[in-house]
Amino acid sequence: MVKFSQAVAAGALSISSTPAFAAVTFTGSVSVAGATTDLSGIAPAFGGNRLSFGSDLVYDRTTDLFYGITDRGPGGGLVDYAPRVNAFRLTFDGTTNAVTGFNLQQTIVFTKSDGTVFSGLNPLLRSGNVATLGDSFDPEGFVRLPNGNMLVADEYGPSIYEFDATGRQIRAYTTPENLKPKLPGGGIDYVNGRPTITSGRQDNRGFEGLTVGANGKVYAIMQDPLVNEGASNQGRNSRNLRIVEFDPATGTATKQFIYQLEDVAAINGRTPGTVDDFASNAQGRSIGVSSISAMGDGTFLVIERDNRGLGVDDPTGARPIGTKRVYRIDLTGATDVSGVSLAGSNSLPAGVVPVGKSLYLDVQEALRAAGQNSFEKLEGLAFGPALAGGGFNLILVTDNDFSVTQSGSGTQFDVCTSGAGGTSVQVALGAGCPTGTALIASRIYSFTATGKDSPVPEPSTWAMMIAGFGIVGAAMRRRARALLA
């Protein structure tokens, strides 16, 4: 099922032999102004409670609420921002099914079990030690459980944390050793990239998506290949990133699978000329995964995208976009590579089978055909309300990076733009944008996904999962009492 609270889709877009959804059609979009404030009541260092919600998205059908999370905040881990989740409602046109409005309902700030607020600061700035993760937190993947608890995938670790409905941390999953960013001698460095670290996740390329499958297992997907897995031991050269399966009862990993990014040569073939082609070492760095969402038939939807489009690095959308796509994947028959190294080659070892993959939706092409702009960070996907005529609203959201960028020395600036094809300027944080420009907005895109199969999970499956997580919660409470005895 899709992240429990998010509705479930089944099938692929006209390329599967037995497509459940025969059509996915763009219906419209709305923008949420970059200067919009959230409901946290916290005054961040960069001035005001600036709203962001596009790092991942889920939908709760029982309350008709969408939940979108922030990442670590503005400035790439250089600002002491409190990561949070925002709950909101969307309105839709009754005739076209197009999204027409956004209404923020609640903001929940993430805290540790002792009430300490998590920080978006990188571990060195927060704890003074690159090897101490502490309360540094970069949320990227999100799941809302039937009991109201939340699972969140963190990119710094990479880590997975469980929180209660108020945002207070309950427990942490165990991160597999091969994913941890390690120095040549085996020490940990959560801040630096290659060549300082020589194994584990690339810097700023940890867990990027999170979901719970129809089998009750938790699945986290890396944004890109591990730092040492690829030709010349360079993850930037590789297509092969990892999906990790966890047992929610124990919080430990049980399997790892290989997801293959689209070949950068194919992506370059869709961009005009060669001036803006992606280099070979951009394969596993500039191309990556943004989200994973489980479906009722046991398959998953994955957002795959490049690092181009309207955003803080290209506020007028000047560079050609290579890819913004949603793929359907199937783990059936894929090899468990928990104990397999992919170092030294872009090719998979003999006998290793990656997950099956087929195109579900070419978002970039759909938006182009509708005369819409593609934003850089397409990061959240959720199936929303059911349609009266059958099928569901499919919602995609973007992360606007708070419309903040920074200089090489770490100085922060607001990014103001007049829009695609226009002009842009950087100003001091909170200074206000010049006339004719505005902070980069968050964009919400709506599609309809229609077909014969319902995305709602079977009631028996829900009952099994709710019971299972209840057992986990009871076990954790017993353990806590024992520790306090």
Image: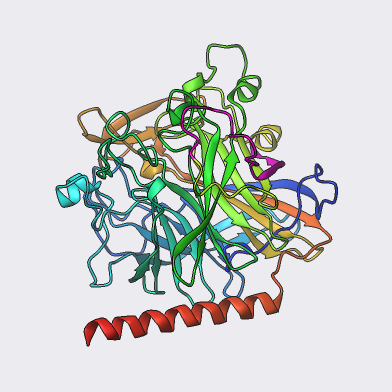
Q: Residue at x 48, y 72 (%)?
A: 249
Question: Is 327 in the magenta?
Answer: no
Give the image quarter of residue 41.
bottom left
Would residue 240 be seen by someone viewing this image from the given angle?
yes
Q: Write down the region rendered in magenta.
A: 341-363
State which quarter of the image contains the C terminus.
bottom left
Residue 447 rendering spot, x and y as whole percentages: 69, 50
Give the image quarter of residue 367.
top right
Q: Is residue 215 left or right of residue 380?
A: right
Q: Residue at x 30, y 28 (%)?
A: 195
Q: Is residue 358 left or right of residue 218?
A: right
Q: How many marks?
A: 0
Question: Is 349 in the magenta?
Answer: yes
Residue 336 rendering spot, x and y as whole percentages: 58, 50
Residue 476 rendering spot, x and y as whole percentages: 38, 79
Front-lying residue, 415 or 379:
379
Q: Residue at x 27, y 32 (%)?
A: 196
Would residue 397 be seen by someone viewing this image from the given angle?
no
Give the image quarter of residue 418.
top left
Q: Is residue 183 left or right of residue 3?
A: left
Residue 422 rendering spot, x and y as whole percentages: 47, 25
Front-lying residue, 458 or 312:
458
Q: Is residue 56 above or below residue 376?
A: below
Front-lying residue, 316 or 464:
464
The secondary structure that dominates the magenta segment is loop
